[in-house]
Amino acid sequence: MTGAYAAGAAADPFDRAASFLTSLIHSLSRPEALLLPHERVEEDAEQGARELARLLLQSHLDLRARREEAELATLDRGGRAQLAAGRTRLEKGHRRQLATVVGPVTVSRCALRAPGLPNRYPADQVLGLPHERHSLGLRRLVVLEAARGSYDHALEAIERRCGTRAVGKRQTEQLVRAAAADIAAFYAARTPDPAASTTLLVLSDRRHGDRDAPGASAGGNKEGGGTGDAHVPHPSVHRGEDLPQADGHTGRRPRRRSGRAPAAPRARGPRPARNGSPPRFNTTRTRSSLPRSTRHKPVTRSTAAAGWFWSTAPPTSSS
């Protein structure tokens, strides 16, 4: 870095970000860039925007560090001791690295020190910095991607999002375990407090088709002493249709329970005439226990003795 550039950066922390933005605009507007395909221009613009975001974040942190030094320098020993619990020595230029979703940045802050006591950094409390290297935004991204799949897939998604390998696999596992440490405290905080004895508790119970429910009658109607909530069959049952199923298909119609005995088989003999037509004869054979291969034999005395019945059809004349 040249002396003139360092002097300009010391004058305004955002000068570096503004200089980079100017160079990015010049790079995208040069004659050579006008001949590039769109995917190449898209890639250059994405990389430039990510670097510009990192420089803006770095400039903001540098500005806050400069104002912190000016504020702490105006305090006397008593003010520093009250601010840092007895620490009165002021040291500037303490730096730490911070990995973010836009790239690594450096946080500069002041330290208040005292013999035999650990350093106190007021800027860490104001910024809410974690003790580890990774920012809270990067931790959130790690947890979200790790919850969607494996750690390898999470690392690939984080690299695509950040443009670089911002976190390792072991660090990803540690961050996920650290994020899940307060689950018990979260659910404990959501547990409601016990209600007072004066709180009214209302319960609603509605039963459908429960024959054992108190007050239920045979018909389930109010006239018979019931509650009126008895089971009502599906309309398709009354229409003789199949019941619709959850998958969109129709199933078999359920068999209706009835106290009637099964119908007797139709008697053999001529059926009654309809509309003046001659009587018809029922030649249906009853079910036999004989093998299937012998069921189609002509009806004779031998087959009738074995279980077949004579037909009542009139004999036909042979030609």
Image (cartoon, helix red, strand yellow):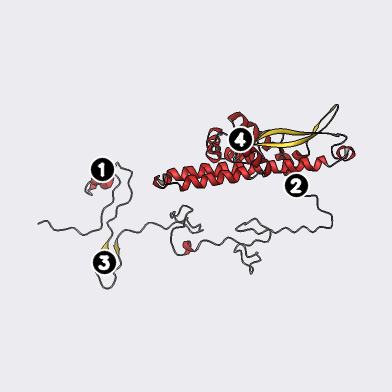
Which of the two marks, 4 or 2, is nearer to us in this view? Answer: 4
Label 3 secondary element:
loop
Residue hosting label 1: 294
Which of the two marks, 1 or 4, is nearer to us in this view? Answer: 4
Q: Position of residue 89 (x, y in %)?
A: 84, 33
Residue under the image location 47 percent in, 64 percent down: 238
Residue hosting label 4: 2
Which of the two marks, 3 or 4, is nearer to us in this view? Answer: 4
Classify 200 as above or below 33.
Answer: below
| Residues at marks 4 and 2, CA–CA distance in whole angstroms | 61 Å
The amino acid marked with disc number 2 is Thr
Taking the view exactly as shown, the residue that stands out farthest to the left is: 319
Which one is nearer the viewer's eye here, 234 or 87? 87
Asked if labels 4 and 1 touch by Cβ distance under 8 angstroms, the answer is: no
| Residues at marks 3 and 4, CA–CA distance in whole angstroms | 121 Å
Residue under the image location 63 percent in, 62 percent down: 217
Query: Which comes before the other along the chain, label 1 or label 3?
Result: 3
Label 1 secondary element:
helix
Residue hosting label 2: 191
Q: Position of residue 311 (x, y in %)?
A: 25, 55
Which one is nearer the viewer's eye here, 20 or 193? 20
Disc sitting over residue 279 in the figure: 3
| Residues at marks 2 and 1, CA–CA distance in whole angstroms | 78 Å
